[in-house]
Amino acid sequence: MSQPSFYVLSDGQRKQYSSHDTSRAGFHHQNLATFCEDVNSAAKRAFPNRGRSRYETVNACLIRWEDDDLGVQQELDALNAVLRDYGFLTNVFLIPKLSSHWDLMRKTLDFIQDRDNDKNLFVLYYAGHGRINSARQAEWVFGQDLNSPFVDWSAIQGLFGTAKSDVLILLDTCAAASSATTTQFAVMETIAACGFERRAPPPGEYSMTNTLVDVLRDWINKLSFSAASLHTEILFRLKLKEKKKGREGVPLEWCVTPIHWINAKDCKAVGIEICRRSVPPLLSATSDSSLEEEQPSTFVDAMDIDFDDANSSSTPLSSVSSTGCYKVPHVLITLQLEENQSLDTEQTARWLDRFPLLAKWVKVEAVFPSYSTLMIMSVPLPIWDMLPDHPACSFIGYV
């Protein structure tokens, strides 16, 4: 069966999956206390705000191809409208088919030079085709043809790596996670529709943009929320959507798991926060307010979290719904420790009692002997988004 027209990946780019990848088995975290400090720091970064923005200006740039063969304009216009409701300054860049890269490069340079400062937040959004080139860098392409006009987005995104402003990047395109980059001064966070090996759904009910717009509309009256919280809610809502029937009645999973990552020179830099900068229109502020309260949501107010109480054994992040599921999605991870602990029930319990911060933010699901100590834990998704990479810590799945 031929690929749908909205699927564009570079030829030959096929990720090799393996059920027997043991490449990380030799890595170990120094000790559990160090990991607890990392988790506590990640929690503070994921919920940095206290109901007020640290940005004096927010400048948003929404990008698509001038010839909209994919049909993204309607969703882009909806996102543009809701960002204006937040009081953000918005710009729409249309990529021409002629001199595509240089045109976007010039517009981006002007955009940064005119607005960049350490009290500003840049919001960048792109919807359209995407692929990975032979150098494993992100390209935005006009169509499926190998000779189709393209933009070297990895090169252009690098311009923001030297900006003083924080940068929030929203990518609704295939192979979106291939656009990871570094930053020298500020914080850069990205929410992408899919990983570098995946294909994003087309515009419509199952697209990341469609859900992004819904979340921003519903949360417009929140005092503030972090980019990590935004990613968590988008993932939560996409997972709630039903599968779409394919050919011969076979259900197909159209929703793809959105990806989040953060780049900052300071590993303890707080995450990006979003809040309304203006009084929204009456309809945006009041419509469906009763329904909003009834709908399940992952939103947690940072004001409800006591970061200073190390002895607290629970937070709103660990609350459970009537069905027994976490209200805030969690990630199941493994952690390999250098320490070799005795594993009878009583001694393990006493050992874990030495780390109250662990019980506050995560749930220890199991502890096993593994030539050292192997732990399985569930971590709230917003915290996991901000947790520093470590080869001894591995992702298992969403719970």
Image (tube, rainbow, N blue to C red):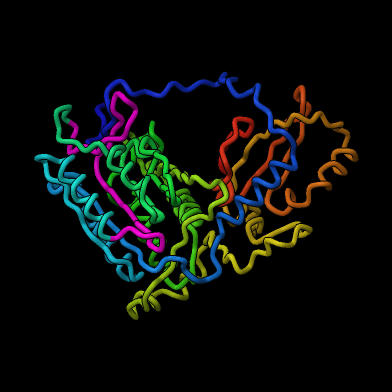
Task: Check the image and report above or below for 151 versus 18.
Answer: below
Instruction: Say which quadrant the C terminus sits in.
Output: top right
Q: Position of 366 compared to 145: left or right?
A: right
Q: Is residue 175 magenta?
A: no
Q: Is residue 219 above or below residue 125?
A: below
Q: Is residue 182 left or right of residue 108?
A: right
Residue at 71% from the left image edge and 62% from the top image edge: 308
Residue for point 55% across, 21% down: 19
Q: What percent of the width, then of the height, locates residue 97?
A: 11, 41
Q: Which is nearer the eye, 206 or 362?
A: 362
Nearer the observer, 296 or 265: 265
What percent of the width, then of the height, locates residue 157?
32, 43
Report the residue that reaches farthest toward the left. Answer: 98
Range shown magenta: 115-144
Q: Is residue 30 visible?
A: yes
| Residue at position x 32%, y 53% in the image | 124
